[in-house]
Image: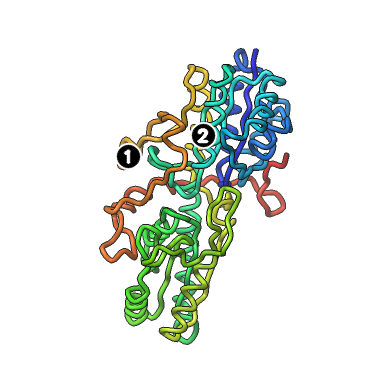
Amino acid sequence: MVNAVYAQSGGVTSVINASALGVYRKIIDNKDTIENLFIGINGINGIAENNLIILNSQDIDKINLLEFTPSSAFGSCRKKLSLNDEGYLKKIFDTFKKNNIRYFFYNGGNDSMDTANLIYEYSKKIKFDLKVIGIPKTIDNDLCFTDHTPGYGSTAKYLAISALEGSIDVKSMCYDSTRIFILETMGRHAGWLTASTALARLNSDFGPHIILIPERAFNKERFLMKAKKTLSEYGYCSIAVSEGIKDEQNNFLSDLGYNDNFGNTQLGFVGKTLSTILMKELGEKSHVAIPDYLQRSGRHISSLCDVKEAIKAGEYAVEYALKGINGKMVTFKRISNKPYEITFDYIDLNMIANQTKFIPDEYITEDGMDVNEKFIEYAKPLIKGESYPEYKNGIPLYYKI
C-alpha cells in the first residue's frame, strides 16, 4: 500500500476544491491501491515542510462541502521552483519518502505546471518512483492545449451577471447622473475574462458596449470616439476592461511598479486610468467596479458545468496515474457545441508550463473593442446551470480545515 498527496497552487477559483473532491472520491474507489490521500498545506510549501493532513481521516460530511467551497480550502502558494533549488527539492522528496507517497497531484495554472514538471524531472533524476499529474485550474482560461480550464466558466458567469447588473444600474441613472460604468476584470495577458462580459447580452442588450482586451493595443482616440458615439446613441456607456491592456508602445496601462513572487508585473486600477481619460477628454464622470478576489471566489453563483468538470478533472488525474501515466496534465477536448460535449485527455507538463493561450483573432470584432458571435458560441455552454451551496443562517456553509 502506498499513499498520494494533493496540493493547490497559484491564484484560486470558486471550483478548485471540487477538483480536490474528485481526487478524493477516485482514491476512495481505489483504496486497495492507495491507502491515504495527504494534503499539502499551502501548496508545495506544505509538502517541503511535511505540513500535511490526511483527508480521508476527516468526516465525510465535511469533505463533501469541498464541492461548494470557493478559494483554496487547504491554502495555496506562489512558490517559484527551479532545478537549482536542490535543497528544497530534497526536502520535498524527503516528505515523499517519509510518508510513502508515490502519487503527486498538483492543481494549478501555468507556473504550477512548471513546478509539477520540475518534480517529475527530479523524480527521474534520483530514480524515485513517483507518478506526477497536473490538474488544470485558472480563471484566466489561458492554459494551452486544453479547450478551457476549471474555474473559468464560474468566473465568466459571475462577471457576465455583474456586467449586466452594473449596466442596468448606470442606464437607470444616466438621465441626470453618471453616464459611464467601468468594470475592471483580471487578465494579465489574455482577455478571456473580460470577453466573458459579452455574455451579459444573451437575453437583452444593456451592455457592455465596449470590451477592451490585452490581445489588442489600446488606442485612446478610437476608444474615446466609440465612447462618445455610444453616449450619443444610448445615453449611457458600459465598459469592460482587462487589467492587462497595453498601449501601442506595449506598456501596461496599470503597472503598479512591482512584481509578484512569480516575477509577474503587478497590475491594478486600469479602470481608474480610463475614468481619468474620460473625465479629461469628454467631461464624463465614471463609476468603476473592481471585483478583484470576488470574481474568482464567487461560489454562490458558480456554473454547474464548471463544477462538474472540475470534479471530473480530479477524478481523471487519479485514473491516469493509476494507469501508469506520468508527467502529464489533464486536458479538455471539445467534441461539439450543440449539444455541448467534451472528452478528457492529457498532455506533457512541459508543453503547458509558461505558455499563454490568447483569444483567437476570429473571436474579436474588427474594431478590436468587442468580441463576436463565435466567442459567444464558445463561452455560452461553460456558464450553463447553477450549483448553489447550502445556506445556514442566511450565509453559505463552506468547508474550513
Kind of element beneath mark 2: strand
Name the residue that disc number 2 marks.
Answer: 135
Which residue occupies 36% across, 67% down?
248
| Foreground residue among 292 and 301 | 292
Tell me the kind of residue under disc 1.
Answer: Pro
On-image quarter of the C terminus: top right
Which residue occupies 43% across, 46% down?
142
Task: Residue 69: tell me if it is visible.
Answer: no
Name the residue that disc number 1 marks.
Answer: 339
Residue 96: which quarter of the image? top right
Q: Residues within 10 Å of mark 2 (few under 14, many from 20)?
A: many
Between the residue at mark 1 and the residue at mark 2, the CA separation in whole angstroms equals 25 Å
| Foreground residue among 59 and 375 | 375
Which residue occupies 38% across, 60% down?
198
Q: Is 391 left or right of 223, judged from the image as shown? A: right
On-image quarter of the N terminus: top right
Kind of element beneath mark 1: loop
User: Considering only vertical position in the picture, is 291 above or below 168?
Assistant: above
